[in-house]
Image (spheres, rainbow, N blue to C red):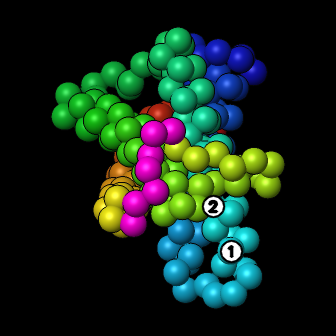
Amino acid sequence: MQIKNSTDRYGLVTKLLHWVVAFCVLGMLLVGSLLDVLAGPTQGAIYGWHKSLGITLLALMIVFMLWSARNIKPSYPAGMPFSQLALAKVVRYLLYISVIAMCLSGWIFTTAKGKPPLLWGWFNLPAPFVPVSDSLGHAIRQWHTYLAWTILGLVILHLIGALYHHFVRKDDVLKRML
């Protein structure tokens, strides 16, 4: 298997980054939806894990975007309508932007609430230049929630597109990432 992308397939690094990010995002959405219903010491431990994974996901997204920018992308199937090409690109870029914004908003709101991430139990990592402020923390937390719903919708669109290509168009769009 090739390391870099080619005009017809994604390379090993792109596939690995895609699937690690995908599972992290889905895990974060699931855990994030359960945080408010948990109680006791379990909640604190899961919050800590969630914060650390959010910072790690931010770093992974930056690496993924840099890697993607430096590599060619496989061509879309011949005859794919312009509207589908445009939608695929818009969804991909909105996913990138939304996941990065989600990670940043979590980092900012926890710092503003005076509870910055303790990165994997090693050290506190407050967001730079963010003051401790309940009102700021509350406002950014609202955006964090909106971004979660946005990401969920974009992931569903992404999955529908991949499944449409695999089962309806019967092209290799999905296979290129597997």
Q: Check residue 158 for magenta coloring.
A: no
The secondary structure that dominates the magenta segment is: loop
Real-space Cα separation, disc 2 to disc 1, in angstroms: 10 Å
- Residue 71 pos. (x, y %): 53, 13
- On the image, numbered disc 2 is attached to which residue? 50
Residue at numbered disc 1: 44
Decide which of 154, 45 is in the foreground and name it.
45
Quarter of the image for the C terminus: give it: top right
- Residue 25 lies, with reference to residue 139, above or below; the image says above
Is residue 158 at all visible to an observer of this figure?
no
Q: Quadrant of residue 48?
A: bottom right
Residue at coordinates 59% horizontally, 55% vertically from top-left? 116
Residue lying at 46% horizontally and 57% vertically, measured from the top left:
132
Q: Is residue 105 left or right of residue 178?
A: left
| Mark 2 residue type | His
The 10 Å Cα crowd at callout 1, few under 14, some 14 to 19, many 20 or more, is few
Residue positioned 45% across, 39% down in the render:
129
Q: Amino acid at mark 1?
A: Gly
Query: Of the residues tagged 2 and 1, which is closer to the observer?
Result: 1
Question: SS at mark 2?
Answer: helix
Comparing 35 with 161, the one in front is 35
Region in magenta = 128-134
| Between 50 and 112, the one nearer to me in the picture | 112
Q: Specify whether residue 96 is in view.
A: yes
Report the residue at 40% width, 60% height from top. 133
Measured as percent of width and height from the top left, residue 170 is found at 44, 41
- 137 above or below 82? below
Where, by quadrant of the figure, is residue 76 drawn?
top left
Where's residue 1, x and y in %?
75, 21
Q: Earlier in the sequence, mark 2 or mark 1?
A: 1
